[in-house]
């Protein structure tokens, strides 16, 4: 069975500082990894995904994530946080044979 | 395309009443998913369809919940009878595939059962 762990319920960062939202996964077979973002009163929006290839994946709004197979991690990063990045972030995983399994989400708060 | 459309956006009802949530997926997407989001349980997959056929409904919490997809452009999630613990935000999502393809989420229906 697939599972995702987002160890931090809340991440606080000052505007302009780098941000990291952590994600670790467990999957049988090859992992396919996603990050989604949810703004207040909205549905989830796709940010980026890793399917194969380069371990560093670049996505929307300046976000990127690094796939680390040995640590089974897929942390989301951004070099310089904006107040508008404040939202709920979800990591998700599939092995290609099952639907996506989502983590519980991490609330990011960027403080001006 | 307008994206995934859900209606109503908000629903307030009394315990015991029937609730019907509606979803119009993105045209051309073969997969449709229904999720429930609560503070306690996070985002839960309830059921998903492939080409209008229900594939996995193991996430449906009880027999009070049912979902249909009569055609490629419409799906419903029905709760009968509703209970206060069904209060949540219900999302519909559609996708060209079910695992490695991006899912596109609707804005959600916020349900409050009194």
Image (cartoon, coloured by chain):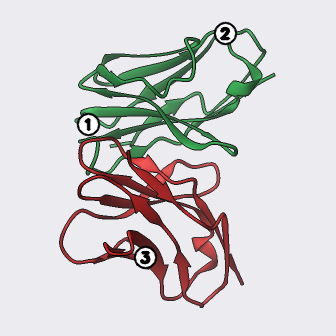
In the image, residue A21 above or below residue A104: below
Disc 3, SS: loop
- Label 3: which residue? A63
Q: Give the crowd class for mark 2: few <14, some 14-19, many >=20 residues within 10 Å.
A: some
Determine which quarter of the picture holds residue A86. bottom right
Q: Nearer the viewer, residue A71 or A74?
A: A71
Q: Which chain carries label 3?
A: A
The residues tagged by marks 1 and 3 sit, at their Cα atoms, a distance apart of: 26 Å
The residues tagged by marks 2 and 3 sit, at their Cα atoms, a distance apart of: 43 Å
Q: Which mark is residue B29?
A: 1
Task: State left or right for residue B49 relative to residue A14.
Answer: left
Chain that the image shows in green:
B
- Residue lying furthest right: B114
Task: State left or right for residue A47 relative to residue A32.
Answer: right
Q: Mark 1 lies on which chain?
A: B
In the image, residue A20 above or below residue B1: below
Disc 1, SS: loop
Residue A24, x across and y down, in percent: 45, 66
Chain that the image shows in red:
A
The residues tagged by marks 2 and 1 sit, at their Cα atoms, a distance apart of: 31 Å
Q: In which quarter of the image is the N terminus of chain B?
A: top left
Residue B34, x across and y down, in percent: 46, 32
- Residue lying furthest left: A53
Residue A46, x across and y down, in percent: 40, 58
In the image, residue A48 above or below residue B113: below
Q: Which mark is residue B81?
A: 2
Residues tagged by mark 1 and mark 3 found on one chain of the structure: no
Q: Nearer the viewer, residue A68 or B112?
A: A68
Disc 2, SS: loop
């Amino acid at each position: 069975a697939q599972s995702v762990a987002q160890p931090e319920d809340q991440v606080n960062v000052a505007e302009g500082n780098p941000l990291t939202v952590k994600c670790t996964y467990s999957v049988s077979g090859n992992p396919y990894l996603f990050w989604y973002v949810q703004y207040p009163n909205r549905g989830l929006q796709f940010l980026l995904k890793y399917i194969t290839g380069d371990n560093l994946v670049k996505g929307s709004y300046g976000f990127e994530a690094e796939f680390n197979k040995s640590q089974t991690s897929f942390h989301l990063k951004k070099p310089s946080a904006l107040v508008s990045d404040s939202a709920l972030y979800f990591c998700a995983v599939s092995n290609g044979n099952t639907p996506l399994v989502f983590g519980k989400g991490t609330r990011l708060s960027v403080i001006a | 395309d307008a994206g995934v459309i859900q209606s109503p956006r908000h629903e307030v009802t009394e315990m015991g009443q029937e609730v019907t949530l509606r979803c119009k997926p993105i045209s051309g997407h073969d997969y449709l998913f229904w999720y429930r989001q609560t503070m306690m349980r996070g985002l839960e997959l309830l059921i998903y369809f492939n080409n209008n056929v229900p594939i996995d409904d193991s996430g449906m919490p009880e027999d009070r919940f049912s979902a249909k997809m009569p055609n490629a452009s419409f799906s419903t999630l029905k709760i009968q009878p509703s209970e206060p613990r069904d209060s949540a935000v219900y999302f519909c999502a559609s996708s060209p595939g079910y695992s490695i393809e991006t899912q596109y989420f609707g804005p959600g229906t916020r349900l409050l059962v009194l």
